[in-house]
Amino acid sequence: MADRIIKGHVGIGPKVTGEALVASDNFSARYDLNRVDGVFSRPTHKLVGQNYVGKVLVLNIAKGGVATAWMLREMAAREMVPLALLLNFANPIMAQGAAFGDVSLIDRFDVDITGAIQTGEQVTVDPETGTVAVHG
């Protein structure tokens, strides 16, 4: 049973449950990640050194260009991809990349999602309903 439900915009991808990895930083699959080792690698990113594989990433705003689409797909093919992306705002390229890589994505929440969830919390991401259930 969920402790609380957070409402966002209807998203894409399958319903998934996993551990949250949270930062009030922006996100680019191209510039922020070491896609081979599965960690955040940009030295100035708040999650530098943290493993993102199989985690629900909770971040502020999508950034970057078209490379995100093929990068998320390639990462998924190697099973080195986040389980889901929860963003305050995702651009169309991030949505395309998530769809192409079969990564669940929800954005445009009623609250600042980076302040509503804490690293380590278990969350269920349901893109069909645009909701995130936070489990205690």
Image (cartoon, rainbow, N blue to C red):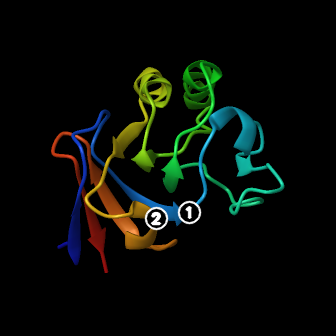
Residue type at mark 1? Ser
Residue found at the very far right of the displayed protein: 43
Q: Which disc number belongs to residue 24?
A: 1
Q: Earlier in the sequence, mark 2 or mark 1?
A: 1
Residue 132 in the image: above or below residue 105: below
Residue at 32 percent of width and 48 percent of height:
108
Residue at 31 percent of width and 64 percent of height:
111
Residue at 47 percent of width and 63 percent of height:
20
Contact? badges 2 and 1 (CB < 8 Å) = yes
Residue type at mark 2? Thr
Residue 41 in the image: above or below residue 48: above
Q: Is residue 34 visible?
A: no
Residue at 84 percent of width and 55 percent of height:
43
Q: Quadrant of residue 34?
A: top right
Mark 2 neighbour density, 10 Å: few (under 14) some (14–19) many (20 or more): many
Across and down, in percent, residue 27 comes to 60, 45
Q: Quadrant of residue 95?
A: top left
Between 32 and 64, the residue placed more toward the observer is: 64
Secondary structure category for the residue under label 1: loop
Q: Which residue is mark 2?
A: 114
Residue 106 in the image: above or below residue 103: below
| Quadrant in which the C terminus is drawn | bottom left
Separation (CA) of disc 2 from disc 1: 5 Å
Secondary structure category for the residue under label 2: helix
Q: Is residue 111 left or right of residue 98?
A: left
Q: Is residue 13 visible?
A: yes
Across and down, in percent, residue 128 comes to 18, 39
